Image (tube, rainbow, N blue to C red):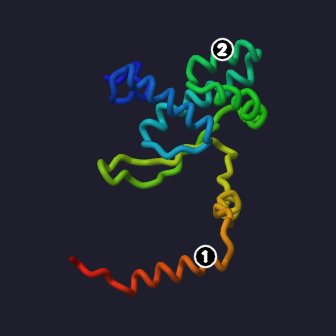
Amino acid sequence: MRHRDARIRLKQKPAHARMLKRNLLTSILLYESVRTTKKRARAVQPLVDRLITVAKKKPPHIAIRHINRFVTDKNASRKIMEVFKDRYAKRTSGLTRMVPAGVRQGDGALLVDFSLIDFEKPSKEVLEEKVKKPTVKKTESKAEAKEKKSSKEKKKESPKKKK
């Protein structure tokens, strides 16, 4: 019989499963997109919806206390109150999305890209702009650099004799 078996349970010990869910919940709130197993995503999905709904409906001082019971980082709590509360003001539920991402190579677990709705991944162009080549300070002149290069080549050309 499967009476009262509505919750998705994880296979770890209870304390470990609780912390795994809290950490995954914090990650999804901070980064807005996470790759994880399908079962873990299904276990965390109701928590995400519930916390954002609490932030929308309760007074701020009560909502923050409720959120901090589940979230392990204060920045995630702040993000719920400042960003998600306004972003999902008109949406009542269905705040997350699971997109299949194949299987994990080691054990064949089903992977999903678990993300919040209305989250846009930055394009490749934006990422390339952020990652710039590190600039090297030029302390020596071009002539000195050529001298060093030529001296290295001379050393390579003349092999040392063994004693």
Pointer 1 residue: 145
> Element at badge 1?
helix
Mark 2 → mark 1, Cα distance in angstroms: 62 Å
In the rendered view, tell whether residue 17 sits above or below residue 115: above
- Mark 2 lies on a secondary structure that is helix
Q: Is residue 31 left or right of residue 118?
A: left
**Mark seen at residue 65:** 2
* Viewer-proximal residue among 125 and 44: 125
Residue 47 lies in quadrant: top right
In this view, which residue lies farthest toward the front? Answer: 163
Residue at image position (54%, 33%) is: 45
Res 51 → quadrant: top right
Query: Which mark, residue 72?
Result: none
Q: Amino acid at mark 2?
A: Arg
Q: Nearer the viewer, residue 30 or 153?
A: 153
- Residue at horizontal 63 percent and vertical 16 percent from the top: 66
Position of the C terminus by quadrant:
bottom left
Question: Where residue 70 sits in the image (x, y, percent)?
Answer: 56, 21
The quadrant where residue 122 appears: bottom right
